[in-house]
Image (cartoon, rainbow, N blue to C red):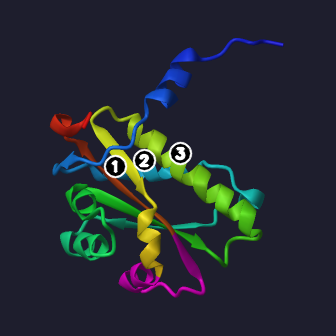
Amino acid sequence: MDTKINVEFLEFIKKRKSIRHFIYQKIDDKIIKNIVECGRWAPSGRNSQPWHICVVIHPTVKHMLSENSKYRETIESAYVNLVIFLDLERGYDRVKDLQAIGAFIENILLAVHAHKELGAVWIGEILNNKESINEIFKLPTDKFELMACLAIGVIDETQRDK
């Protein structure tokens, strides 16, 4: 058995951090699409890919999101927020679907980390206002369940280690 490991990859994983402070700077659409595509490669039972994602860049929608979280400043200062839902019609087993969503989110966080100037934070606290978030996107709560909001932006280096 070959026991060689990719030490660089392990160090890459260990260096990923939650970033909550951003400078408002445009992120190219191709980069955003690539980050979301990396999420899609996450494993899911029966390849069901039970996620539904809303990409939020518009300031008005970001403000509406931020009103439903104590992390208002983070959501509004991020260039893009990815609002992730469990698509209850695509899934087939709740536990496995939740595991798939977690893998999907982690792939996205690692893809963001691969872009040296970008950072992200997984906001779970927003789940306290699931119904309001569904209303923003006009998604029925019996078909879509909020899982997370990922705030993504250019890292504010002046706040990085605070």
Q: Indicate left or right for 52 with 4 as reference.
A: left
Q: Which one is earlier in the sequence, the residue at label 1 or at label 3?
A: 1
Q: Please give the range of residues in magenta.
A: 131-146
Which three-letter amino acid code belongs to the residue tagged 2? Asn
- Residue 73 coordinates in the image, percent (x, y): 21, 60
Which three-letter amino acid code belongs to the residue tagged 1? Lys
User: What separation in Å lies between label 3 and label 2 (alpha carbons)?
Assistant: 11 Å
Q: Nearer the viewer, mark 1 or mark 3?
A: 3
User: What separation in Å lies between label 1 and label 3 (alpha carbons)?
Assistant: 17 Å
- Residue 75 coordinates in the image, percent (x, y): 28, 61
Relative height, residue 71 to residue 85 (above, below): above
Q: Residue at x 41, y 34 (%)?
A: 114
Q: Which residue is mark 1?
A: 30
- Residue 134 coordinates in the image, percent (x, y): 44, 82
Q: Which mark is residue 34?
A: 2
| SS at badge 3 | helix
Q: Residues within 10 Å of mark 1 (few under 14, many from 20)?
A: few
Q: Residue at x 36, y 82 (%)?
A: 136
Asked which quadrant contains residue 141, the reply is bottom right
Q: Residue at x 72, y 58 (%)?
A: 47
Q: Residues within 10 Å of mark 3 (few under 14, many from 20)?
A: many
Which three-letter amino acid code belongs to the residue tagged 3? Asn
User: What separation in Å lies between label 1 and label 2 (alpha carbons)?
Assistant: 6 Å
